[in-house]
């Protein structure tokens, strides 16, 4: 997994208008943009599809994801629920500062 690359991309997407434009175009433009980052297929698909829950489980920092959500048109409450649903659907957070070392029934990082 390339957690650093995922977070680097989200950081750029949150701050760089050109990256936002290219991501927003979708299709080949988005694929070319994502190819510039060292992502595996699972990470690329999660970013490309806007799967906030999967990105959270893969270890992406919530501060980065909370800026990605509005770019996708996801409201705050839906963003929080997407992280919860990600844990239910994909299992415990695998890496990063939110990695779960206990059962998934416990609240983690305010989620």
Image: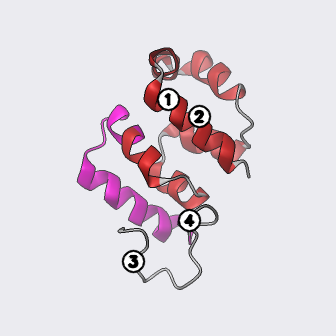
> How far apart are the alpha carbons under marks 1 and 4?
24 Å
Please state the horizontal and vertical placement of residue 90, each as a whole percent of the image: 56, 65
**Marks 1,2: beta carbons within 8 A:** yes
Residue visible at 42% across and 82% down in the picture: 106
Please state which of the two labelled residues, at mark 4 or mark 2, is closer to the viewer.
2
Tag on residue 107?
A: 3
Magenta residue check for 74: yes
Judge the density around disc 4: few (<14), some (14-19), many (≥20) Cα neighbours within 10 Å.
some
Q: Nearer the viewer, mark 1 or mark 4?
A: 1
- Which of the two residues, 19 or 25, is positioned nearer the viewer here? 19
Q: Which disc is residue 9 wearing?
A: 2
Q: CA distance from mark 4 to mark 2?
A: 22 Å
Determine whether 103 is above or below 10 in the image: below
User: Which one is nearer the viewer's eye here, 102 or 44?
Assistant: 102
Q: Which residues are magenta?
A: 68-92
Disc 2 on helix, strand or loop? Answer: helix
Where residue 23 appears, x then y in whole percent? 51, 23
């Amino acid at each position: 997994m390339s957690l650093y690359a995922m977070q680097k991309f989200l950081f750029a997407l949150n701050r760089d208008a050109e990256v936002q434009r290219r991501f927003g175009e979708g299709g080949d433009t988005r694929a070319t943009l994502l190819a510039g980052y060292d992502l595996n297929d699972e990470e690329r698909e999660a970013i490309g599809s806007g799967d906030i829950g999967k990105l959270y489980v893969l270890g992406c920092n919530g501060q980065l994801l909370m800026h990605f959500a509005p770019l996708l048109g996801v409201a705050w409450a839906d963003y929080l629920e997407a992280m919860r649903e990600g844990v239910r659907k994909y299992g415990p957070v695998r890496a990063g500062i939110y990695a779960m070392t206990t059962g998934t029934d416990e609240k983690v990082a305010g989620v």
